[in-house]
Image: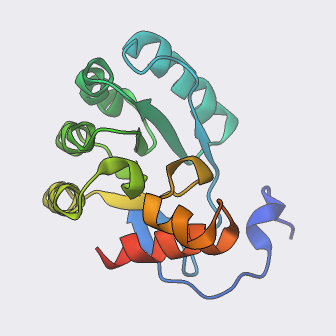
Amino acid sequence: MSSVRPWRDIARRKSRQIMVGSVPVGGDAPITVQTMTNTLTSDPVATINQIRRCEDAGADIIRVSCPDVESTAALGKIVRAARIPIVADIHFHYKRALEAADAGAACLRINPGNIGSSDRVAEVVRAAKANGCAIRIGVNAGSLEKDLLEKYGEPCPEALVESALDHIKL
């Protein structure tokens, strides 16, 4: 019998399974569908309404942007209302990651190149560990470290991979 979600039945490379809230990701777990809200997270009513529509459409995990203290202040209410795990997308300030972990985010999406020093990244890792949060490392051309831009001369796949691997070590 064919799956209701046939994309979940594809052959995949072996990976380690982690938990994002109650949802297993990687390993032999079913492929999950993640989406992101486009509401202001600081508006919990609008964000929760959009999350409900995503849940009803079959999303397994949802990401919300946490660029400011107003957004992380609203996050606790959003997390409590959601039926699926919430990933807090942290942009530039490591304190937003600390606040999001304390507010109950199931996962933090961080770009360490934008977070700052290795001490700040370590503080985020400690907060995530203390709150049972997974961490997703994201890198992009706009946030490459100056030393990597100098080494490679421009943003390129090799620089992105090196940045990600350096931050995984942290």
Residue 161, quarter of the rendered image: bottom right
For residue 45, above or below residue 37: above
Q: In terms of depth relative to the viewer, which is nearer, 154 or 101?
A: 154
Q: Is residue 121 left or right of residue 11?
A: left
Q: In terms of depth relative to the viewer, which is nearer, 68 or 14?
A: 68
For residue 37, above or below residue 117: above
Q: In terms of depth relative to the viewer, which is nearer, 32 or 156?
A: 156
Q: How is the image coloured?
A: rainbow
For residue 65, above or below residue 2: above
The residue lying at 29 percent from left, 31 percent from top is: 80
Residue 66 pos. (x, y %): 38, 31
The residue lying at 86 percent from left, 67 percent from top is: 2
Residue 22 pos. (x, y %): 39, 57
Give the residue at the far right of this rendering.
2
Task: Locate the N terminus by quadrant.
Answer: bottom right
Residue 153 pos. (x, y %): 63, 65
Q: Is residue 77 left or right of residue 112?
A: left
Residue 105, quarter of the rendered image: top left
